[in-house]
Image: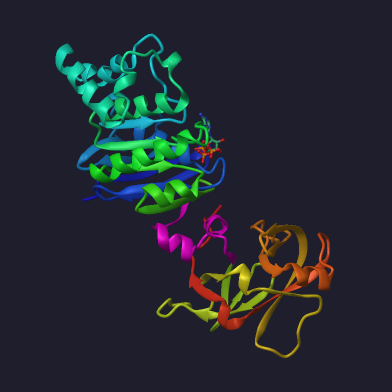
Amino acid sequence: MSALSVRARIERRGVDLDLDLADGEVLAVLGPNGAGKSTLLSLIAGLVRPDHGTVMLGDATLTDTAAGVFVPPHARGVALLSQRPLLFPHLSAAANVAFAPRSRGTGRAASRVLARQWLQAVDAEDLARRRPARLSGGQAQRVAIARALAAEPRLLLLDEPMSALDVTAAPVVRRLLRTVLREQSRTAVIVTHDLLDALALADRVAIVDAGRIVESGTVRSVLTSPRSAFGARIAGVDLLAGTMAATGSLETPWGTTVSGIEEPGGDLHPGAAAVALFRPAAVAVHLEPPHASPRNALPVTIAEMEVHGTTVRVRGAENPDGSAGLAADVTAAAVADLDLAPGRQVYFVVKTQEVELHPALPAPAG
Ligand SMILES: Nc1ncnc2c1ncn2[C@@H]1O[C@H](COP(=O)(O)OP(=O)(O)OP(=O)(O)O)[C@@H](O)[C@H]1O
């Protein structure tokens, strides 16, 4: 049985989500703005009702539209930590933390003891008497984490918990969350824009795009072998999506053919949805297509160029399907020799054996 299972559709938000989480698993949810990441958390926390669907926490049904079940947020056993620590301004840090056990019916004295323990666990004991107005962003977030944990949730939801913190406070809170999530084997879903969070905190990554989970896997697999445009962008690899035209050959919706090496056992029959992946460092930039060689020559209009140390990343304009333009890493000398500049038409040349072909999820209908 899954620790968490979500199948939920909300028409007006264009969201149709399907997700399972194992006990003790930490899932990082990444995706572009407006993709539906916060909506996913709201569905689990009970802040939003789906039009159709279910949310199960272990064997407890939290939402079931068909059966008319909707457990209110406070009774779900789920704690939500948001970007800004929503502490009660009129209560001290200790009283804020004690509020969680108090509202579950724990006595005043016992709640106070628990609050002290949780503040200790987040290294914020010395802040116990302070009101939120006198806490820094990082300190307030630590207190908010203590309060979330003091509620003894079965599931922790984190909505960009580091995004409102400055550069010195973010690593401290990230480290603290890592300790909390790992040592206590918490089950958690963390929405983030920051790949570092996924690397530091999560076992698995799910990528949400346009209201759907378009990719899910271990942090490593998504970074080394992404299947979605967003996954490719965060992994820093080039990705072209299309369908298999023949063995070892993918065709994009705009008619570009890319040859590559098929994933063994990938079952890439002609017509199958697939992605071609290659590294920007494997791309050479030419002014003319090289003839008669087993290479791909992809026509690209240069959109921008960025210097990274001794290499220059040449980024092509967006692909006709709206996906991110291809990137090539070339030497500064090559940029000078070829007189590369934004607006120039060039060919990105990449050897067949540098291109991996993998099965992809078909594009969502509608
Ligand atoms: N309260 C709301 N009422 C109606 N629609 C909403 C509401 N909140 C979000 N939406 C819509 O639902 C979709 C998903 O938004 P959501 O906030 O879940 O995305 P997100 O991935 O969290 O984005 P971001 O990274 O910008 O926070 C968007 O189309 C958005 O406009």
Q: Is residue 72 visible?
A: no
In this picture, residue 50 sits left or right of residue 333: left
257 shown above or below 160: below
Count of numbered badges drawn on the protein: 0
341 shown above or below 185: below
Say which residue appears at 49% left-offset and 72% top-offset: 358
In this picture, residue 153 sits left or right of residue 250: left
Say which residue appears at 42% left-offset and 21% top-offset: 86
251 shown above or below 114: below
Residue 35 in the image: x percent, y percent? Answer: 53, 44
Please report the bounds of the magenta region as a residue range. 213-239
Residue 60 in the image: x percent, y percent? Answer: 21, 38
Q: Residue furthest bottom?
A: 292
Q: Is residue 5 visible?
A: yes
In this picture, residue 343 sits left or right of residue 230: right
Q: Is residue 216 magenta?
A: yes
Q: Front-most of 135 and 228?
A: 135
Please tell me in which quadrant of the rendered image residue 259 appears. Answer: bottom right
Q: Front-most of 197 and 73?
A: 197
Q: How is the image coloured?
A: rainbow
Please tell me in which quadrant of the rendered image residue 52 appears. Answer: top left
Say which residue appears at 20% left-offset and 16% top-offset: 112
Residue 100 in the image: x percent, y percent? Answer: 26, 21
In this picture, residue 31 sits left or right of residue 327: left
Q: Is residue 132 magenta?
A: no
Say which residue appears at 52% left-offset and 56% top-offset: 364
Please tell me in which quadrant of the rendered image residue 328 appears. Answer: bottom right
Residue 343 in the image: x percent, y percent? Answer: 83, 60
Q: Front-most of 160 and 13?
A: 160
